[in-house]
Amino acid sequence: MNMQIALWHRSRATWSPSHVLRRLRGPGLILLAVLSLGLSWSWLSAPAGADQADPVRQLVHFRDAAHDWLLVVDPETRELVVYDASNGRPLERLGADDGLPEVDSIAQSGSLLLVADRQHAEVRLLKLPQLQQVAFDPR
C-alpha cells in the first residue's frame, strides 16, 4: 500500500472543530452562530407554565472592605435574608415589618440593591451596606 495515500485518507477522515470552522465562511458561520444561540436559549428558558424560581434574581453577593454578604430571597416568607458569606450565618431578615414588599427578586447596582415584588408593582431601593431605603421616583 502506498504510504502517502494512506496518510492522506487518514487526515481527511479525522476532523476537528477548528477544521470545520476554517471551512465555514460568511453565511455558513452566521447560520451556525444563530443555531447555537437558539439551542442555548431553548435550554435556558423554563418550560411553558412552569412556576420555577429564577436563582439569578434571588441571590446577590455583596462585598466591600468590611462586609462579605449573600443577600437571598426566602421564597417561603418572601423576605430578604442577609447571610455572612464566609460562614453562612444569618445576619438579618428584612420583610414587610421593615417596609419591603413581598420580595420576589433582587438586583445589585454598585452600592444599591433593587428589591421588587412579583409584579414589580412595588419596588424598593436599599443602600448597601446600611440596608436603608433610599427614596426614588421610578418614572
Image: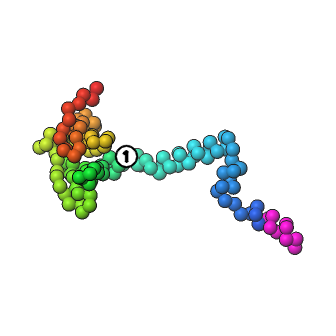
Segment tinted magenta in the rendering: 1-9
In the image, 138 versus 126, the foreground residue is: 126
Count of marks placed on residues: 1
- For this view, does 119 lie left or right of residue 20? left
The reply to whether the magenta stretch includes residue 18 is no
Residue in the image at 57% along x and 43% along y: 34
The residue sitting at the left extreme is 97
Secondary structure that dominates the magenta span = helix
The residue sitting at the right extreme is 2
Residue type (three-letter) at the residue carrying disc 1: Gly
Residue 76 makes an appearance in the image = no
Colour treatment of the image: rainbow
Q: Position of residue 111 (x, y in %)?
A: 27, 42
Residue 56 makes an appearance in the image = yes
The reply to whether the magenta stretch includes residue 7 is yes
The residue sitting at the bottom extreme is 1
Residue in the image at 35% along x and 49% along y: 56
Quarter of the figure that contains the N terminus = bottom right
- For this view, does 93 lie left or right of residue 63? left
Q: Position of residue 9 (x, y in %)?
A: 80, 64
Residue topped by disc 1:
49
Q: Position of residue 133 (x, y in %)?
A: 18, 38
Task: Locate residue 86: give its quadrant.
Answer: bottom left
The residue sitting at the front extreme is 65
In the image, 14 versus 126, the foreground residue is: 126
In the image, 1 versus 49, the foreground residue is: 1
The residue carrying pointer 1 sits among few (fewer than 14), some (14 to 19) or many (20 or more) residues within 10 Å by Cα, namely: few
Residue in the image at 28% along x and 26% along y: 139
Residue in the image at 85% along x and 66% along y: 5
Q: Position of residue 129 (x, y in %)?
A: 22, 46
